[in-house]
Amino acid sequence: MKFEKLVMAFVVIFLTANVAMAQKFLQGAFTFSKKKTSYITLNNGETVEGVLWDLDRKKGNIEEVTIKKTGSKKKTTYEPKDIKHMYLPPSGWDKMGKALDFMNDPRQWGADNELDSEKIKDGYAYFEQAEVKIKKKTMTLLMQLVNPSFEENLKVYFDPYAKETASLGVGGLKVAGGIAKSYFVQKGKSPAFKLEKKNYKDEASGLFGKCKAVKDLKSKWSDFEEAVFKHAKECN
């Protein structure tokens, strides 16, 4: 019991201190609830609500989404090319990690863009259709946006295959570290490309331009999140 109290005290102190730290991306989610309502908006403007029945992936990327519509016994399957964007409810630990990340930084509350911030606060993962360059091929994929409240200049998407830096765990709970070593990043209307930790310094100038607010944040991968935030809020 004493150990559990010590663990919880450490976590509370860490999360409180984390508010003052660099802006955080939301965690990527792999598993999703099959009980809570999912929301899909199609390219034709139609909105579909229902329970996620199945989600097929190939090499980490979503190939098909099958929904059992609310009030219907039928199941409907959609491909990435049909979906404009969608909100899926992560399940279990995926939801906990996502919600904690979002709540830890007050600057993420109440995003002033077109996204539904209430769904994101409730732990939903937001996916949108995007053109993504993988090696030499450009593909239309459904990508999870990890910076929904500061995506004005750069959109950062979860990389399902990203490795992570070393992390600190207490009592089985990861409380520090574990930074993803790669994301997919989209600037303007260009296709998103894979940005890796090892290439960050080389790519930073092209991503952030002459933005003075991020001048000292272009060298360390650990500063990438804060650089994206400051670029969005101070260099429009």
Image (cartoon, grey):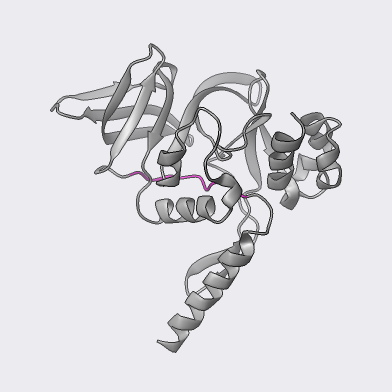
> Which residue appears at 44% of the width and 17% of the height?
81
Does residue 223 sit above or below 193 in this rendering?
A: below
Does residue 181 sit above or below 169 in this rendering?
A: above
Q: Residue furthest top?
A: 44
Residue 200: give x, y in percent of width and height.
77, 41
Instruction: Report whether 180 appears left or right of 224.
Output: left
Q: Nearer the viewer, residue 200 or 228?
A: 228
Instruction: Report whether 96 appears left or right of 226.
Output: left
Residue 132: give x, y in percent of width and height.
59, 24
> Which residue appears at 55% of the width and 75% of the height?
10
Magenta span has 26? Answer: yes
Which residues fall within the magenta stretch?
Answer: 24-32
Does residue 49 sit above or below 219 in this rendering?
A: above
Magenta span has 88? Answer: no
> Which residue appears at 63% of the width and 39% of the height?
183
Residue 226: give x, y in percent of width and height.
71, 47
Instruction: Report whether 154 appears left or right of 112.
Output: right
In this figure, what is the number of numbered marks? 0
Q: Nearer the viewer, residue 50 or 30?
A: 50
Does the image show residue 150?
Answer: yes
Q: Quadrant of residue 84?
A: top left
Q: Nearer the viewer, residue 215 or 171?
A: 215
Q: Quadrant of the N terminus?
A: bottom left
Q: Nearer the viewer, residue 138 or 152?
A: 152
Does the image show residue 25?
Answer: no
Q: Quadrant of residue 130?
A: top right
Q: Main structural element of the magenta stretch: helix, strand or loop?
A: loop
Residue 33: give x, y in percent of width and height.
31, 45
Q: Quadrant of the C terminus?
A: top right
> Which residue appears at 62% of the width and 59% of the height?
19
Does residue 92 sit above or below 72 in this rendering?
A: below
